[in-house]
Amino acid sequence: MSAIGSKLRVWRGRALSHPQLSDLVLGLVVTALVLAATVIGGDDQESRPLHGTDYTAAVAAAALIAGRRRWPLPVLALATLATAAATAETNLLPAFAAAALVCVYTVASTAGRAAAWSYTVVAATLVYLAAVLLGGAGWRQPESVSVLAWGGLATALGEVARVRRAYLEAVLERADRAERSREEEARRRVVEERLRIARELHDVVAHHIAMINVQAGVAAHVLGDQPDQARNSMAEVRRAARTVLEELSTVLGVLRAPGDPAEAAAEPPPGLNRLDDLLRTLTAAGLRVEHTQEGDARDLPAAVDHAAFRIVQEALTNAHKHGAGGTVRLCLAYTHRDVSIVVDNAQRVPPPVPAGTGYGLVGVRERATAVGGTVTADGDGAGTFRVRAHLPAPAPRSAP
């Protein structure tokens, strides 16, 4: 059975690729069956030999069926007139009747429901009247009434085929749309992941490279007069380089394949628990930071904790690179609803990087937005540049 089903699918595919040829074959098969039934006969019809009109009608009927797909309505009209004429002259020549039924099915499977039933009613009524008025059949004779029944059956089958085809087209369209949506979602996620990795790399590299640059400059400046200070500066360079390598390894761990042993050993992203190390590194680089805290420190959600650390790191690094010297003030404020970060530093006039531009501040805003927070970064008009961030972090409810 499977072999027969596969052959039928192959033949169906070939028929769909050559519709005119398949229609011609269908016409020949239908007319051959009609001629065979005429010769063999049946319970309600006596057998008889074939005449020239039978062969002529068979060829004409096959031609009508072959053209049914290209010109459905004109072919239906011709088949209806031929069937009516044959009914009036020879009491329903079977070849034209079969062709008319095939044409009715074709129109019903391509036209709308109302139009299909309208054409069927007109065609069946015309043949019925020809059989009664011109062919001498009775109004209630089964052969006459069967014209209406066969027409309705052909129309119903064509309607079923049309609905099924429309359903399959709708299913395929939804599948294509779903596939396109999945591809667009995958591309969007790839872009978001690239932006996240780029932001992490910027935060990791920019801060530590700035520290390395400052310490290397200090070492070069005091190398001849203060070798101990130069040695300390080079030690800070080594420490900063080692730290940036470790953090780069952690950030790039997201690119490893799932199940990679190195992935399981990756450290969690840094949070405010590493703020003291950050301040110590900046102090060694020559930045004076006045750190104050309002409210009681508490454990923050991982995403908020990581975003807060990176915002502080970026703000202090920018203050060190672009500030005018002096003391940078850092204030962390914990409330029941959020955690606030304020970094104030004296800025140069004019500032080397306009407020709001540069990838660092863009990354800061993106980090805050990702966790539902806000960031502002601008001058106060009195020579102080301020970065202020609010990150939502509701305090957990105490147990009753």
Image (spheres, rainbow, N blue to C red):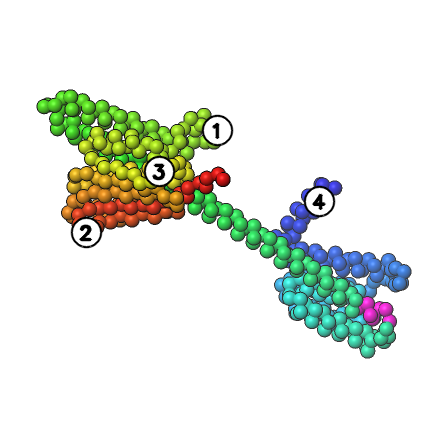
The magenta region covers 141-147
Residue 34 visible: yes
SS of the residue under disc 2: loop
Q: Earlier in the sequence, mark 3 or mark 2?
A: 3
Q: CA distance from mark 3 to mark 2?
A: 32 Å
- The nearer-to-camera label among 1 and 4 is 1
Q: Position of residue 281 (x, y in %)?
A: 25, 30
Q: Earlier in the sequence, mark 3 or mark 1?
A: 1
Location of mark 2 (residue): 381
Q: Position of residue 394 (x, y in %)?
A: 41, 43
Q: Give the amino acid at mark 4.
A: Gly
Task: Check contact, mark 1 vs mark 2: CB within 8 A.
Answer: no
Residue 124 location, quadrant: bottom right
Q: Main secondary structure of the magenta part?
A: helix
Task: Check contact, mark 4 vs mark 2: CB within 8 A.
Answer: no
Q: Residue furthest bottom?
A: 133
Q: Is residue 145 magenta?
A: yes
Q: Residue at x 19, y 51 (%)?
A: 381
Q: Residue furthest left?
A: 225
Location of mark 3 (residue): 296
Location of mark 4 (residue): 5
Location of mark 1 (residue): 259
Q: CA distance from mark 3 to mark 4?
A: 76 Å
- The nearer-to-camera label among 3 and 2 is 3
Q: Residue at x 22, y 23 (%)?
A: 235
Q: CA distance from mark 1 to mark 2?
A: 53 Å
